[in-house]
Image: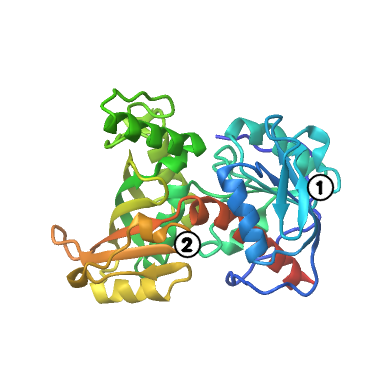
Amino acid sequence: MGQACSLPLRTRHPGRKLDAYTPSLQPFLNPVYETLAVVGATGAVGRIVLEQLANRNFPYKRLKLLASQRSAGQQVRFKDETITVELLAPGAFEDVDIVIASTPDEVSAEFAPYAVKEGAIVVDESGYWRMDPKVPLIIPEVNPDAIADHQGIIASPNCSTTQMVVALAPLHKAAKVKRVVVSTYQATSGAGLAGNAELESSVRQILDGQTPGHETFQHPIGFNLIPQIGSEKFEGYTSEEMKMVYETRKIMGDDNIQVCPTAVRVPVTIGHSESILVETEKPLTVAEATELFRAAPGITVVDDLANHQYPMPRDCDGKDDVFVGRIRRDISGDGHGIAFWCVSDNLRKGAATNAVQIAELLQQSVASAG
């Protein structure tokens, strides 16, 4: 768990509570941010962040790209300009207004405070700050008002948590979620570019009759499932699984929600899938749950078993929504359970898209304050 930032917090654009988050694909009339910095710009998530900034017409006047020594000096084409990637260093955040950062935990722990000290707001995708009590953990469709409490750093949740909570939120609002049993089937891209490369090499080695090697994962991932993501954390649960417990409670503002997770790595490049059983205080029918899903922002329902229609990773690749299907009642329970299947592009809503939406939420709070 990250520690509260001990450096002075000088945020140029403090947040303000919003009744709801309204994503926009239209250009903002008055750009708020002079300088936007993207940290980790050459990584898998960073590249999608840049794509989203362009597609969603995010308001800024100058874009600064930052990365490690390995990537510094590379040139990136963005819209109509070519930008040279600069070295991520303590002095790199001077005159930066907002930062979207996709880095390992230890990098965020070191550099986010430097950005805040310079007066920037950091939207952080690492795991380091998520459970810090002074850092809001935000999914804009779920808890936009919590952004008002930021002190310079705003965290984006773990990818598996994000898609689950987007789906749980409308059920919680209508019937109050008590307990969740979830099994995740997580793509190799959740481990970065190296994860996908290892999947490809593993499959090729097996097809060539070779014994596959492994470095990124605990075992060869080709034609295999690995029921461990992260290290052992608590009573046999892994760090990835406990993130889903703690982050769900923080985002939904309810420490009484019980979550029993099992996280599994699967040989799929993009798209996390989740089998979810949710028990609610007030019973919901399948029809009621389906209508709640359909009405919720950021959710697309694909649910027609007779015609073999349900969410699958290959169909959700490159899309920003959370997809829900196989909605059915819990036939083992007392009428308070709904089971469903949930799929989302882990690099988009699970990472890059959510971070850009948080930045949009900040812009909207500034606009409403003005």
Question: Who's the residue at 45% across and 44% down the image?
Answer: 246
Question: Closest to the observer: 209 or 118?
Answer: 209
* Type of amino acid at the residue the image marks with label 1: Gly
Q: Which residue is depicted at the point 77% across and 48% down? A: 83
Left or right side of 365 for 180: left
Q: How many labels does the image show?
A: 2
Q: Quadrant of the N terminus?
A: top right
Query: What is the quadrant of residue 116 in the picture?
Result: top right
| Residue sitting farthest toward the front | 208
The residue under label 1 is: 119
- Name the quadrant containing residue 166: bottom left
Residue 362 position in % (x across, y down): 69, 61
Mark 1: give few (<14), some (14-19) or many (20+) Cα within 10 Å. many
CA–CA distance in space, label 2 to label 1: 33 Å
Q: Which of 238 and 215 is in front in this view?
A: 215
Farthest left residue in view: 332
Q: Where is residue 48 in the image (x, y as percent from the top left)?
A: 58, 53
The vertical placement of 278 against 6, above or below, is below
Q: Where is residue 154 in the image (x, y as percent from the top left)?
A: 64, 50
